[in-house]
Amino acid sequence: MRSQDCDILIQGGGPVGLACAAWLLQKFPEAKLTLVDRNSINDADLATADSRGIALSHGSKLLLDTIKAWPTDCADIHRVHVSQAGRFGRALMTREELNQAALGHIIRYRDIHIAIRQALREIQAKSPHFIWRHTSDNHEQMNAKCIVHAEGGLFKTQDWVESGRDYGQSALVGLVEVENALPHQAWERFTAEGPLAVLPSHYGTNILNLVWCGSPESSQQRLQLNEIDFLKSLQNEFGSRIGRFLKIQDRRVFELGLNYRKHITKDNEVWIGNAAQTLHPVAGQGLNLGLRDAFLLAEKLASLFSGSTEEQTPAQIQNALESYAHSRKADRTTTIGLTDLMARVFTSNLAPIVVARGLALSALQWLPPVKTSLARQMMFGRR
Ligand SMILES: Cc1cc2nc3c(=O)[nH]c(=O)nc-3n(C[C@H](O)[C@H](O)[C@H](O)COP(=O)(O)OP(=O)(O)OC[C@H]3O[C@@H](n4cnc5c(N)ncnc54)[C@H](O)[C@@H]3O)c2cc1C
């Protein structure tokens, strides 16, 4: 075998690719695995990278705990309050109703990324055939029996477009300081232009993560507004439930949409995480779904490559990947479908939809089994 050859090649060292490598090596330390990462191998460029708050479910926490990759800087959510600006309908979900320690956790993207990198470094010490290299180190064409695509990417920045939807929306994210927040409470408010989420942060009760969805034009305008005007406009949309909005920092805008592959395998290649599906963040599901992809693929590949000392044939590899794709079908379909539905329903201003939305929120409040099963899907995916 040449130094450029390996059994499994993972392309893309975002949270999903890194986690897949870590779970695979944890189950099968002898794996001949190469991870090609565009980020520098030390964490230098990540320390100042993307600091948007990401909601991770309790299911994702349980998965990341298995590789000791849970970041220390994290804020737990105990209650989620959902409402519509200026319309009827609201729902409150609490951890007590679901009998869970937390409904979810908010962590900065870069902290998740760095925590998984650190976990992978620990595992790397016991993995003799694992190579972790930067994209610029790839001078020769690499041969791999199986290629895992984890190149991720954001909506409209990817070099592939398959099925999906452009919602004509962007999200303005930032860190906002308020006067009077409730500890561990998240707020999701549906405005005329789209969802506005205010989520806890590990910086303290009154410093919150803001995800404010709107048309691309409004989001760009909000990005340019001076601080006073920005806070005034935010206060108008959100109302006074958590007192005055006092400060905003780290404003950034992301374009939002749905882009997903109908087929996530082809011959010896497989796509996971955002490389397989890129979702609207309305339900906070993209990374959660990607981590479940990574975990189940790692299980499948570990059992295939550790199972026999004989060379795996292309047909065996293809079968294993197809079986993986089959096992992901229900979870992918449900999560993509629910997120798409929420993104469309909660951004429409058509009168019947606004009324239906109010009824749906009221139903959530008054029909606990519906609420519980929706929350469980969001927390653990479809199993
Ligand atoms: C505003 C916003 C809010 C969000 N909120 C949530 C949330 O609350 N909860 C949630 O679960 N999800 C959320 N998401 C989605 C989440 O960010 C993504 O699902 C997640 O980052 C996907 O991880 P990934 O590793 O697949 O891809 P990425 O995070 O995009 O990482 C891919 C990595 O691969 C590298 N790469 C790319 N091409 C190559 C190549 N050719 N070779 C080597 N490396 C390469 C990139 O540099 C990058 O580091 C949100 C997204 C947005 C935009």
Image (cartoon, grey):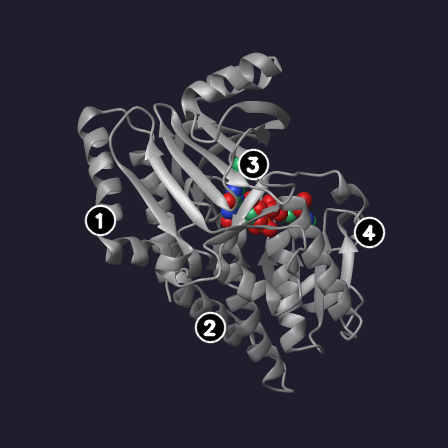
Answer above or below: position of 316 versus 43.
below
* Residue under numbered circle 2: 319
Q: Which residue is mark 4?
A: 42
Q: CA distance from mark 4 to mark 1?
A: 50 Å
Say what secondary structure mark 1 lies in.
helix
Mark 3 CB within 8 Å of ligand 1: no
Residue beneath disc 1: 366
Q: Quadrant of ligand 1?
A: top right
Answer whether labels 2 and 4 touch (C-beta < 8 Å): no
Q: Quadrant of the C terminus?
A: bottom left
Label 2 Cα neighbours within 10 Å, binned few <14 / some 14-19 / many ≥20: some
Dot 4 or dot 1, earlier in sequence: 4
The alpha-carbon separation of the residues under discs 1 and 3 comes to 29 Å
- Where does residue 216 sit, x and y in percent of width and height? 48, 21
Looking at the image, residue 275 lies above or below residue 1: above
Distance (Cα) linking label 2 and label 3: 43 Å
Residue type marked 4 = Asn
* In front: label 4 or label 3: 3
Residue underneath mark 3:
209
In the rendered image, residue 110, in percent from the top left (x then y), is placed at 67, 45
The kind of secondary structure element at disc 2 is: helix
> Going from the N terminus, do you reach mark 2 or mark 4 first?
4
Earlier residue among tags 1 and 2: 2
Q: CA distance from mark 2 to mark 4?
A: 36 Å
Who's the residue at 25% across and 58% down the image?
369
Quarter containing the N terminus: bottom right
Q: Nearer the viewer, residue 141 or 243?
A: 243
